[in-house]
Amino acid sequence: MHWLLMKDGNMRDRRLDVAVVSEIPASYLTDGYAVIPSLFDPIEISRIAREIDRLFEDYARLPAGHTYDLDSRPGDGSPGRIPALRGVLTLRPELRAARGLARAVTLAENLIGPEAEVLWDSAVYKPSGSSSETPWHQDEAVYGLSKIRKPRSIVYFWVALDAVGESSGCIRFVPGSHLGPLLPHAWRNGDTSSSLVVSGPIEGPAMVSVPLGPGDATVHHSRTLHGSGPNASGSCRKGWVLGVGRPAAPRWLRRLKRGLLGAAGRSGGR
């Protein structure tokens, strides 16, 4: 049982606090994605957006490995066409207390099973007037291209930090594409720090664009084809991506390994 401490001091089962309707798991299974209204409440998403804005203001001074670009990273370290930050929760660990994250984990467990956790996160900004599109891709392809160990199961959340529509480059999906095979992929422009791109034409039903309000989110399957268009609006398009899944090694095994390593370290120091 998972519990949250409410503002009134009472304990509440967090599964009852998920701001989603019962049809979401069914639409996820059918289409490979679902829309989640108000995953984060207005006050919480506003605070998160401010913190991420501050990180982007310090973009060139952030520790190595946190900044990258989804389309042609500049050589001077400044934000490029689609600047991104990996590990927001590492840079701002206080954000882990956000109730929206607890909701995301609960929803993920409803879709993929128990012991889910936030495995990684990334903020992606698409500046006003950017002509860059995020190409069609399936997130599962990253494990084969990067040799990263694949989780037992994982789903991906795209959280809107402010209002995003078709003109600003909202996320779009090919419904039902998760039921097909994992397609061949490559790195955009051959850059391993850039975005994935499907190597070949896309076949299937028409794509669906998903406008979102601040705090709204989508959740999608690792094989669902998705991307986004250019930002022709007058404001920056801001999103926060969460990979929530069940790690390759179960929790009990990781605790056991930490215990054994700790014991080995203590005995070695005697």
Image (cartoon, rainbow, N blue to C red):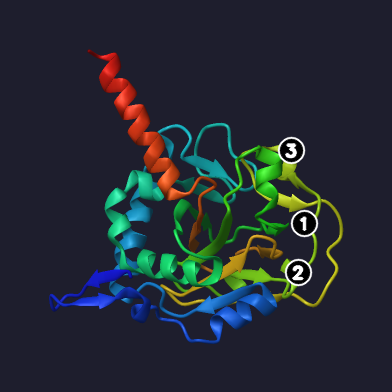
Q: Which residue is mark 3?
A: 190
Helix, strand or loop for disc 3: helix
Q: Rounded to the nearest whole Å, what is the CA distance between mark 3 and mark 1? A: 20 Å
Of circles 2 and 3, which is in front?
2
Give how far across and how far down residue 125 sits, in percent.
51, 56
Q: Position of residue 205 (x, y in %)?
A: 81, 77
SS class of the residue under badge 1?
Answer: loop
Given the image, on which type of amino acid does mark 3 rest?
Gly
Count of all numbered marks drawn on residues in the image: 3
What residue is shown with label 1? 182
Question: Can you say which quadrant of the picture contains the C terminus?
Answer: top left
Amino acid type, label 2: Leu
Give the amino acid at mark 1: Leu
Residue occupying the point 36% across, 61% down? 49
Relative depth, front residue between 39 and 16 = 16
Tell me what residue is drawn at x 26 percent, y 21 percent.
Answer: 266
Q: In the rendering, at what x and y percent does residue 79 appear?
A: 51, 44
Q: Nearer the viewer, residue 221 or 252?
A: 252
Secondary structure at numbered mark 2: helix
Left or right, residue 164 beside residue 118: right
The label on residue 179 is: 2
In the rendered image, is residue 50 in sight? yes
Whole-Å distance between the Cαs marked 1 and 2? 9 Å
- Tell me: residue 252, above or below residue 107: above
Image quarter hosting the N terminus? bottom left
Do callouts 1 and 2 mark residues in contact (Cβ within 8 Å)?
no
Q: Residue at x 25, y 70 (%)?
A: 4
Mark sitting earlier along the chain (2/3): 2
> Could you tell me how far apart the alpha carbons at marks 2 and 3 are, in whole angstroms?
28 Å
User: For the residue carrying disc 1, how many other residues have a C-alpha within 10 Å: few (<14), some (14-19), or many (20+)?
Assistant: some
